[in-house]
Amino acid sequence: MKLNRTFLNIIRFLLTVALLMNGAVSSAFAEVRIKDVVSLQSARENQIMGYGLVAGLNGTGDSLRNSPFTEASMKSMLDQLGIGRTNDQFRTKNMAAVLVTAKLPPFANKGTKIDVNIASIGDASSLSGGTLIFTPLYGGDGEIYASAQGGLIVSGFSAQGDAASITQSTPTSARIPNGGIVEVSAPGDLNSEDVLVLQLLNPDFDTAISITDRINKYTKSKFKTELASELSHQAIGVKVPDSVSPTRFFASIGRLSITPDTPARIVVDERTGTVVIGSKVQVSTVAITHGGLTVSVTETPEASQPQPFSDGQTVVLPNTQIDVFQQEGNVGIVKGPSLEQLVNGLNMMGAKPSGIIAILQAMKTSGALQAELIVQ
């Protein structure tokens, strides 16, 4: 009960802050820079990946009998290095086959260092202490864009004995900060573009119009013409003036401030009991009662023993006790167009986080909740 009350107090505090932001002081506080709510369509990341081997494991690598691809990779690597070998099978457990993934930053040039992620694909129990051997990383077009190599950083660990074991995090996943080097420059060139397409991180028609009007106001005073036009609720096109480079122009419009519009939305996470209510949420007048029904089933088996010197056998007789408890629930009225009145109404009913989620779902079904309800 104390934990639920503390959680409700936290929710009440956060929603009070949201209410203040929606009040008189929100006009200045809610302004954000354009570059914080948009991204360049041409400045996109590219996913790259490769297959490699990790060496130097302390007996925690792949068992080659169960991971034949690891053994085949080791033989292929030794052949490329010109090392003679026999046809006997390997028995080492200090190597593991892994997948290496990374993100190629937009406009990355040759020599740029990037972070890489490593994940085991065999039956290795841990990658701790291992070193990734030189691994080429391929793009979606099959071309090599980067290479990776270096010592692994593993955050998890695993230990076990004859009767118990413990594992924290994931010891079969690792990272190498700055372990990758870009070999081929990323596709695209910002300075060759005549029109910059700005994509909204949170698509919204009103926000797109606000950004367009703010940019046109700036370009009208700076370049004597309007250069921006809305393409849709998630994209804005801006022509680049001839007198300035696209890089400098995007930096200048990115510093402009606008007030983005937020939708009326409620997000609930049933697993953690988290409820986030947007400031634009409105509720029609509705009467609510919320109570809990608890059914408890207790099994207490009893042993029945035969009389002494008889031929009977001891048997176990089932003994089941069922208790039903229903919590009292008062009828409360929740109404009002503001977030504060909604929160106060739920708090006056003494609803717990799980109860609030159930109430919000029922209010949405009844049509009294004028907002989008997202259940995760």
Image: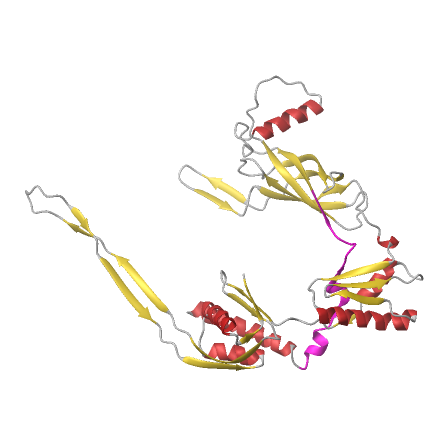
In this figure, what is the number of numbered marks?
A: 0
**Is residue 357 rendered to the left or right of residue 51?**
left
Indicate the quadrant where residue 20 lies: bottom right
Indicate the quadrant where residue 217 lies: bottom right
Magenta region includes residue 136: no
Q: Which residue corresponds to the image point at 54% horizontal and 48% vertical from the top-left?
A: 169
Nearer to me, 251 or 218: 218
Q: Residue furthest top?
A: 86
Q: Residue furthest right?
A: 243
Q: Coloring scheme of the render? A: secondary structure
Residue 231 x, y percent position in the rendering: 78, 64
Nearer to me, 297 or 367: 367
Residue 88 x, y percent position in the rendering: 57, 18
**Is residue 243 rendered to the left or right of residue 305?**
right
Residue 148 x, y percent position in the rendering: 71, 39
Q: Residue furthest left?
A: 309
Q: Which residue corresponds to the image point at 83% horizontal and 67% vertical from the top-left?
A: 228
Magenta region includes residue 46: yes
Q: Quadrant of the N terminus?
A: bottom left
Residue 285 x, y percent position in the rendering: 51, 82
Q: Quadrant of the C terminus?
A: bottom right
Q: Which residue corresponds to the image point at 56% horizontal and 79% vertical from the top-left?
A: 340
Give the magenta-colored segment's residue range: 24-48
Nearer to me, 91 or 187: 187
